[in-house]
Image: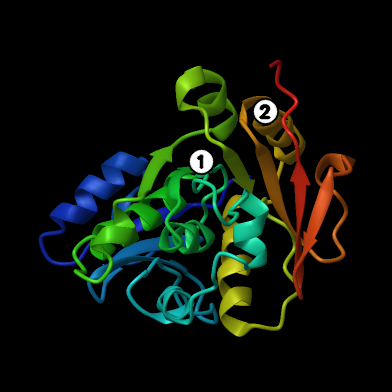
């Protein structure tokens, strides 16, 4: 059963009206008794929050500050596990990456800071709206304009999008970070992941998405997993790249030619 979502309107609410129509959600000045989640424009951003009184704070996408800005300033580098997972190597052209499970866009943003062109695909209309809002605001930041030219976003089912892509536009690498029960101790990550898990439910397409990705990728598919999680779809990777709390399972293409 999908959770009920409403859009909170304040003032004239033109943006809210457009968003509610786009998402086919009810528009209200206060959360309805049947609503589990609320989307609202607050603090110059679009944010999602749970409606219950004891719920954690809202989630939103902000590439200009917070965790994303910290990752950009610290510089994860082209030798980081994430970079190596998608095929970043010295002396060769940077891979074109398709992030098939974009979520809140954190890893795609890091890859773009390294110089990769990244196409993000997000199936959830709610998460897509949050991500699109974050991208819009980031493109207004002069410090991020170069990075933002390398990030693009598509709504929809990644399996269908991959199947419809022309051979000439297929990505070098496809990145998957499917939803997995989060047990980390980081409070922010826990809040974001628990909210998204309540909103989206368990991953239902991981195995099929892996198959579709291997048929579409030119060079590799990288799957991010918790360090002790089982292989996606119980399919053993061709090799792995280990990080302190996560690992990247790397699969070679299985498409003809």
Disc 1 from disc 2: Cα separation: 15 Å
Q: Which of the 4 image quarters holds residue 220?
A: top right
**Residue depicted at x 68% and y 34%:** 209
* Farthest-out residue, front: 91
At which x and y percent is residue 203? 70, 46
* Farthest-out residue, top: 256
Q: Is residue 199 left or right of residue 30?
A: right
User: Mark 1 Cα within 10 Å, few/some/many (few <14, many 20+)?
Assistant: some
- Check contact, mark 1 vs mark 2: CB within 8 A: no
Instruction: Work out whether residue 17 or residue 248 is closer to the camera in this orientation and state it.
Output: 248
- Against 103, residue 11 (above or below) is below
- Against 10, residue 151 (above or below) is above
**Residue depicted at x 65% and y 35%:** 219
**Residue depicted at x 42% and y 56%:** 115
Dot label at residue 212: 2
At which x and y percent is residue 7? 33, 57
Q: How many marks?
A: 2
User: Mark 2 Cα within 10 Å, few/some/many (few <14, many 20+)?
Assistant: many
Q: Is residue 8 visible?
A: no
**Residue depicted at x 52% and y 44%:** 95
- Against 215, residue 4 (above or below) is below
Q: Which residue is mark 1?
A: 123
Instruction: Work out whether residue 252 or residue 47 is closer to the camera in this orientation and state it.
Output: 252
At which x and y percent is residue 109? 44, 61
Q: Is residue 247 left or right of residue 28?
A: right
Quadrant location of the N terminus in the rendered image: top right
Q: Which of the 4 image quarters holds residue 172?
A: top right
- The answer to which of marks 1 and 2 sits earlier in the sequence is 1
Q: Is residue 246 left or right of residue 28?
A: right
Instruction: Please tell me whether mark 1 sits on a helix, a strand or a loop.
Output: loop
In front: label 1 or label 2: 2
Instruction: Please tell me whether mark 2 sits on a helix, a strand or a loop.
Output: helix
């Amino acid at each position: 059963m999908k959770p009920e979502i409403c859009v909170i309107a304040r003032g004239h609410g033109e943006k809210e009206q457009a968003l509610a129509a786009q998402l086919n959600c009810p528009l209200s000045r206060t959360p309805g008794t049947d609503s589990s989640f609320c989307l609202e424009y607050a603090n110059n951003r679009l944010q999602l929050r749970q409606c219950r009184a004891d719920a954690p704070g809202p989630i939103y996408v902000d590439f200009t500050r917070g965790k994303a800005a910290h990752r950009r300033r610290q510089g994860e580098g082209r030798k980081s596990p994430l970079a190596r997972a998608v095929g970043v190597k010295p002396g060769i052209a940077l891979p074109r990456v398709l992030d098939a499970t974009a979520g809140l866009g954190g890893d795609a943003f890091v890859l773009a800071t390294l110089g990769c062109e990244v196409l993000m695909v997000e199936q959830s209309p709610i998460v897509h709206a949050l991500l699109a809002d974050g991208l819009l605001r980031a493109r207004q930041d002069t410090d991020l304009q170069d990075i933002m030219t390398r990030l693009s976003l598509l709504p929809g089912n990644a399996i269908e999008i991959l199947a419809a892509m022309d051979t000439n536009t297929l990505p070098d690498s496809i990145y998957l970070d499917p939803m997995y029960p989060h047990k980390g101790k980081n409070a922010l990550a826990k809040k974001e992941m628990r909210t998204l898990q309540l909103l989206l439910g368990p991953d239902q397409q991981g195995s099929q998405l892996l198959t579709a990705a291997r048929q579409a990728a030119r060079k590799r598919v990288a799957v991010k997993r918790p360090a002790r999680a089982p292989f996606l779809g119980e399919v053993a990777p061709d090799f792995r790249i280990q990080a302190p709390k996560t690992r990247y399972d790397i699969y070679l293409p299985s498409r003809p030619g």
